Image (cartoon, grey):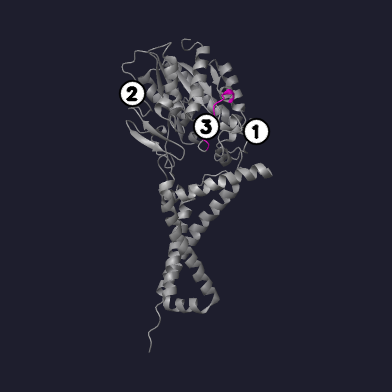
Amino acid sequence: MDAPAPPRRAVFLASGLLMAGALLLSLAAFLRHPYAVNPTTVVACRAASWAGLGLGPALLLAGAWLWLRRERADLWLAGTAGGRLLLGLVLLYAAGFVALPAAEAGLRPWMKAGAPDLMIRYHPTRHHAMLANESRRVQGREYRFHLSTNSLGMRGPEPRAPKGSPRILLLGNCFTEGVGVEAEETFCARMQALLTPSCPQVEVVNGGCASYSPLLEWRLLQETGPALRPDLVVLLLDCGNIADDFLYTETASFAPDGDLLGVRGTEAAPGKKPVMSSILSTPQHSALCTGMMTLLRPACAHAILSWGLRPPVTAQGDLHMDHQAVARVGMRDRLAGDLQRSQGYLLRVRDLSRSLGAGFVLVTYPWGHQVNEREWMPGRLDSGFLPGEAGDTWMMEEMRDFGAREGFPVADLTEEFRRSGRFPLYYPRIGQWTPAGHAVAAEGIVRALRASGLVPP
């Protein structure tokens, strides 16, 4: 009597189901915290998340059952149309499981992908901060630059000690830090060069850190101000800072008198991903995904321009998800309370600066879509702005009036950028300033400081 044929189909199907279950579980874990402004994307992420959490264990159990009952399963697969169809689908899945990593391996040497390492760490009272005394080469999709920090975790050389000359402290986010450019190309270094002829001993300290906002800058000044003893504090503000303040306030602690005790960091802080989301961090930033997006973005832009399509924005004006809400038309009344919250933090920074014997200046500046139709393309599509559509600048107007009421100078760089004939001033996808953008910012800030009499003419 012949021995029964080995249960190849059942074993193959069980293996395929096990792989599919593991993949769906990984996908579900990664999509638990999707960041997207397109409602279709959000719905798809949530659906995939729940499907993965539900189907993943089911597929794993089904694969185990088929392995244990492989003789009967093999007969069913061979003898029914449904079994043959299921076998074909598993074969297709297995082929993709092999082909996609092969394509990734072939593309990776040609495409630099992945999130840049900006040396961000968890911080117990400032949510996050840069590592101190570090030096690394940072590479993103649009730039390569060298990032070095001093003992305070700030970009640039060690502040002079003891202090014996005028010192300007710049506070801000990634624009101030200078993501994407070398240290000598940042507007901080350019300001130093522009001010030195009239004030040879001036020292400009770069206190910028990615994703900082007035609340975190208040805490930074609390912790470093007494040691730095600045003569002038210049805080740079953009339209995304209002949303950042809204989010950081949720984990902030205040004393009964309103003084800031700290902003607690979380696992979702920059530089510290949730543990489960790291499962698919490599595929998320893969060269294959980058290549697909590179091909799709121009097609999306062409469709938007040709057919007048507008990318829908989830929860427009909801600062939990819409980081660019302040730059949208018609948000002035809706976000008035959120703007006042940030203004309250700015007053705290001003008062703290004065208590340290320093002057205070607020500088507002635009993103690319608030300058002209060419800047920050195609990056603006991710935030739901049409190619050529201008972002609103009502926040800058409110801040100018606010400074006039509270008695401190406010310099708005919007017209400086709009009048500049240089292009590009912003990187097309990440939206940070190019070296030319930093040059425009430095010239505009120095011009404003001289006009206010805060630095020698």
Check the image and name the residue furthest to the right: 307
Instruction: Return the mark for residue 158.
Output: 2
- Is the Cβ of the residue at disc 2 closer than 8 Å to that at disc 3? no
Q: Position of residue 131 (x, y in %)?
A: 35, 33
The span from disc 1 to disc 3 (Cα, nearest Å) is 22 Å
In x, y percent, where is residue 454? 48, 12
Up/down of 197 relative to 244, above or below:
above
CA gap between label 1 and label 2 equals 43 Å
Residue with the mark numbered 1: 329
Magenta stretch: residue 424 in it?
Answer: yes
- Residue type (three-letter) at the residue carrying disc 2: Glu
Q: Earlier in the sequence, mark 1 or mark 2?
A: 2
Can residue 236 be seen here? Answer: yes
Label 3 element class: loop
Residue occupying image coordinates x 61% and y 33%: 373
**Horizontal placement of 242 versus 253: left or right?**
right
The crowding category of the residue bearing disc 2, from other C-alpha atoms within 10 Å (few below 14, some 14 to 19, many at least 20), is some
The residue shown at (57%, 23%) is: 399
Please identify the quadrant where the N terminus is shown.
bottom left
Residue stretch rendered in magenta on the structure: 418-428
Residue under pointer 3: 426
Say which of 303 and 222 sits in front.
Answer: 303
Q: Earlier in the sequence, mark 1 or mark 3?
A: 1
Helix, strand or loop status at disc 1: loop
Q: Amino acid at mark 3?
A: Tyr
Mark 2: secondary structure: loop
Closer to the eye: label 1 or 2: 2
Question: Local crowd at mark 1 within 10 Å, few (<14), some, or many (≥20)?
Answer: few
Res 121 visible: no
- Image x and y of residue 106, in percent: 42, 52
Residue 124 x/y as whole percent? 38, 35
Queried whether the magenta region covers residue 435, the answer comes back as no
